[in-house]
Image (cartoon, helix red, strand yellow):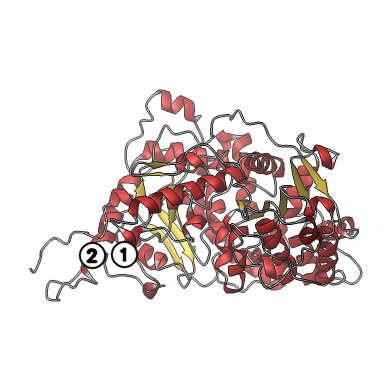
């Protein structure tokens, strides 16, 4: 009927959002489980030299002042390993350690090789692999190992055979926990066989833009000098008097509106197309730049090397890129809410830039009909940070890859026929925009969330300038990560058992593991909750039947790496 009200019938909005709560604290309560002890295994003779070379190249400057942001956003391995070296949970006897940490900055080594400042990175990785797989504790059944390699493409960084060794050991011998920025790295076609390795992965933050990280630190030290962060008055004092501000634009800090600067052509399930339509229906102004390069227009460039000095200099292309990129930084500092949609991966550096800027992130993911708990997955350090307190979460309804990069028309002209394809999408976008407008106008909520976001970033997510805080959160995750994986398995089994008969289309595929939040308290849906029991006897092993000592001694990479070994002994391939 011409002029009829179009109603979203795809899915209730309440099933696709998390209502933010002003009184929810970002810091999780102290836990009774003690931090585990760990031993740092330095197995490469070249490791000190590689680290010294990299430090000489950077020469005390922020990473991104010299290197492209496509490199620097993953440069957390060296900082984390340096911080772990002085952590109080470190022990100096491997027999006394609950965890064994591979003390190798493999991504840093990769960059040193890319710059051409050292011998072959591939050779270093091959030597490290041979040393590691011959180590008695690597072959010890049940021994827990942590490998820090932040980049999402593990095979590209350490080589195919090394990556497969990690996966095979994790499957057949004992837990190998990969610390990386995103579990969905396994969705890269050639990494499908690493699924269990990524499923168990421990998330670490991307490295944020240095200007924003510095500003977050300065605001923490001197809130009165940081109007952009809205930090003139301590949160506790404002909440005591009810947080009364009034109006849609905040009284202190002058922040309002929305922003998104980024590429619309990502393999995101259609999320960014839906976001663009939502933006067109928002009441408050939006800074929108739909560009191929997420932080500017200029083409970035690799650093310039001098034959007379180890110090790198930024290329002209990088300097130009950084100048244009400054506009995105300023937009983040002025906006009240910043869109942080999923891209090719579920998590992007944009989220951490947003938190550092004191802009409330709006995290968008395509999760279909899955429980809204999936929206909380893949964020780092969930035993230290309650991400519900520092972000707005929404799953735009009725999106698909067919709409990648497209803006979906939110209205249907009265003269045109309303079809099943156009009617629900437009109505859903309008409803989602109206909800976001309500969030934007809740001044008290946003001021509280802004302070919490900046505090959480500074405490545990600023890897470059506060690696000690990030390392502390990482060690806390080690206390839970294996049990969390078992809890996720229990949850999915219960979820599928409940839905298998009545609603089989809602059964959770194995990819559901990649989306689930790692904190068990967030695993609940329609009466299905995490048991809290962690791993039952033998459950931390992915293969229940132990290998014979002879087979373990001959453990090598073979064609069966990606095959499941549950419930049976897999014969190791012969030499």
For marks 2 and 1 on the same chain, the one whose residue lies earlier in the sequence? 1
Q: Residue at x 29, y 61 (%)?
A: 429
- Disc 1 crowd, CA 10 A, few/some/many (<14, 14-19, 20+): many
Is residue 324 left or right of 288 when viewed as pictured? right
Q: Could one spot residue 526 in this view of the protein?
A: yes
Q: Secondary structure at mark 1?
A: loop
Quadrant including the N terminus? bottom left
Residue labelled with disc 1: 398
Compare residues 204 and 43 and report the one nearer the observer.
43
- Disc 2 crowd, CA 10 A, few/some/many (<14, 14-19, 20+): many
Is residue 182 left or right of 418 when viewed as pictured? right
Q: Secondary structure at mark 2?
A: helix
Compare residues 159 and 492 and report the one nearer the observer.
492
> How much space separates mark 2 and mark 1, taking CA atoms?
8 Å
- Residue 402 in the image: state x and y as whole percent: 37, 75
Q: Residue furthest left?
A: 1
- Residue 242 in the image: state x and y as whole percent: 37, 27
Is residue 230 left or right of 319 when viewed as pictured? left
User: Which quarter of the picture shows residue 105?
Assistant: bottom right
Q: Residue furthest top?
A: 240
Compare residues 559 and 574 and report the one nearer the observer.
574
Answer above or below: position of 304 versus 219. below
- Residue 104 in the image: state x and y as whole percent: 80, 56
Residue labelled with disc 2: 424
Asked whether disc 2 touches disc 1, contact meaning CB atoms under 8 Å apart, the reply is yes
């Amino acid at each position: 009927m011409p002029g009829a009200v179009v109603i979203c019938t795809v899915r209730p909005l309440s099933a696709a959002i998390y209502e933010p709560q002003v009184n929810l604290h970002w810091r999780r309560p102290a836990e009774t489980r003690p931090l585990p002890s760990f031993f740092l295994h330095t197995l490469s003779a070249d490791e000190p030299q590689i680290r010294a070379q990299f430090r000489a190249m950077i020469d005390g400057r922020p990473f991104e002042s010299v290197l492209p942001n496509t490199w620097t956003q993953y440069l957390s391995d060296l900082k984390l390993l340096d911080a772990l070296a002085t952590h109080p949970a470190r022990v100096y006897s491997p027999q006394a350690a609950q965890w064994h940490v591979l003390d190798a900055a493999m991504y840093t080594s990769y960059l040193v090789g890319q710059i051409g400042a050292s011998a072959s990175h591939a050779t270093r990785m091959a030597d490290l692999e041979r040393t590691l797989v011959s180590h008695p504790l690597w072959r010890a059944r049940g021994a827990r190992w942590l490998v820090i390699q932040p980049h999402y493409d593990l095979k590209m960084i350490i080589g195919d055979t090394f990556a497969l060794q990690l996966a095979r050991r994790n499957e057949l011998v004992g837990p190998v926990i990969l610390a990386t920025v995103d579990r969905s790295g396994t969705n890269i076609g050639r990494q499908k066989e690493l699924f269990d390795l990524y499923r168990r992965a421990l998330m670490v933050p991307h490295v944020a833009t240095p200007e924003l990280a510095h500003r977050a630190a300065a605001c923490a030290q001197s809130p009165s000098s940081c109007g952009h962060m809205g930090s003139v008055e301590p949160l506790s004092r404002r909440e005591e008097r009810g947080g009364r501000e009034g109006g849609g634009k905040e009284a202190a800090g002058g922040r309002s509106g929305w922003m998104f600067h980024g590429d619309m052509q990502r393999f995101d399930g259609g999320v960014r197309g839906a976001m663009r339509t939502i933006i067109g229906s928002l009441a408050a102004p939006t800074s929108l730049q739909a560009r191929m390069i997420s932080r500017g227009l200029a083409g970035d460039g690799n650093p310039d090397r001098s034959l007379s000095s180890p110090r790198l200099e930024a290329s002209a292309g990088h300097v130009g890129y950084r100048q244009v990129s400054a506009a995105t930084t300023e937009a983040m500092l002025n906006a009240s809410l910043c869109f942080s949609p999923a891209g090719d991966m579920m998590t992007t550096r944009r989220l951490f830039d947003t938190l550092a800027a004191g802009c409330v992130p709006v995290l968008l993911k395509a999760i279909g009909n899955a429980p809204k708990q999936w929206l909380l997955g893949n964020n780092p350090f969930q035993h230290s940070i309650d991400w519900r307190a520092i972000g707005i979460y929404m799953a735009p309804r009725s999106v698909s890859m067919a709409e990648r990069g497209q803006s979906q028309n939110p209205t249907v002209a009265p003269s045109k026929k309303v079809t099943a394809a156009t009617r629900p999408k437009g109505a859903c976008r309008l409803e989602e925009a109206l909800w976001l407008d309500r969030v934007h106008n809740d001044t008290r909520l946003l001021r509280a969330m802004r302070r919490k976001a900046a505090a959480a970033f500074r405490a545990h997510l600023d890897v470059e300038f506060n690696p000690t805080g990030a390392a502390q959160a990482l060690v806390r995750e080690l206390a839970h990560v294996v049990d969390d994986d078992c809890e996720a398995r229990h949850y999915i089994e219960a979820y599928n058992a409940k839905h298998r008969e009545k609603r089989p289309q809602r059964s959770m595929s194995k990819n559901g593991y990649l989306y689930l939040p790692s904190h068990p308290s967030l695993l609940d849906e329609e009466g299905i909750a995490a048991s809290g029991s962690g791993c039952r006897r033998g459950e931390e092993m992915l293969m229940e039947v132990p290998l014979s000592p002879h087979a373990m001694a001959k453990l090598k990479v073979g064609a069966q790496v990606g095959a499941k070994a549950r419930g049976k002994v897999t014969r190791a391939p012969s030499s």
